[in-house]
Image (cartoon, helix red, strand yellow):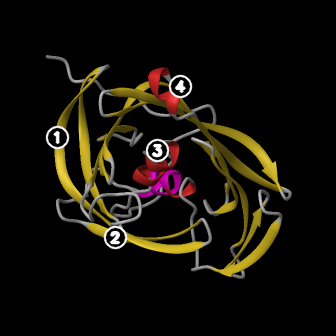
Amino acid sequence: MKNKCLFILIFLLSFSQVFSQEKEAFKTGEWFKFRIHYGWFNASFATLEVKDDVFNNQAVHHVVGKGKSTGLLHLFFEVDDNYQTYIAKDSSLPLRFVRDINEGGHTKNKVIDFNQSKNLAKVHDKKHNTVKNFTVRKNVHDMLSVFYYLRNKIDENSIEKGDEILVDLFFDEENYQFKTVFLGREILKTKFGKVASLKFRPYVQAGRVFEEEESLTFWVSDDANKIPLKVEADLAVGSLEADLDAFKGLKHPFKIIMD
């Protein structure tokens, strides 16, 4: 079994929606914790946290994502993932992306520095001690920054079923473009109670991690926060589910529907 853990969660959260006048959906101090299930295993926990920082003399949102295996899975397949992105506050574009992972002995340690004005990305592979330069698309995002960028752009009041958009990403030395479709609204049962949610399906390249193009489904809160609530994925070696387990530091009220 090749567990992708936090990478899968981040990929799923990299969704696209209808753009509107920008509004801030998050703030410094926001923190999410997710419980990730793989079949009947409680496979791991993952966290996402937003911090204030300065990078190359620019004010940035420093987002840190971590994932660790737990329970029985940890005995057979240890996972220790660390993802980071440095997002310029003035442009909402990433300046640096960090991927430092250990998944069952499969390790990667890469740092990507973006030059957004020149559409370039420099990839420093620390494990193999190499540096490569790549051409990227204009206003490109990494797999973590795009989630926060799009949360600021979505308009929960105007989005309509069937709306879609393409997103340009650069990840692991490759340019990606994938489509996400809004499937509609649902009342989702969570550990916090029933929550009004927006349901999405990203169309991804089959045969790499996921079983087929339409193997992913996820839900975010239908409010100003756009909190990731739930993810379901059919993988080439089974199914995965991730649920929001805890949160703090939200910018807007989180609405629970009372029975």
Whether residue 23 is visible here, answered yes or no, is no
SS assignment at label 1: strand
Amino acid type, label 2? Ile
The span shown in magenta is: 147-153
Q: Quick check: 156 above or below 186?
A: below
Distance, label 1 to label 3, CA atoms, is 29 Å
SS assignment at label 4: helix
Residues 4 and 232: in front is 4
Residue 3 circle label: 3
Is residue 25 rendered to the left or right of residue 192?
Answer: right
Is residue 97 rendered to the left or right of residue 143?
Answer: right
Q: Which residue corresponds to mark 1?
A: 186
Q: Residue at x 43, y 61 (%)?
A: 21
Distance, label 4 to label 1, CA atoms, is 37 Å
Is residue 253 rendered to the left or right of residue 175?
Answer: left
Q: Residue at x 64, y 63 (%)?
A: 91
SS assignment at label 3: loop
Amino acid type, label 4? Leu
Q: Which residue corresponds to mark 2?
A: 165
Q: Is residue 205 magenta?
A: no
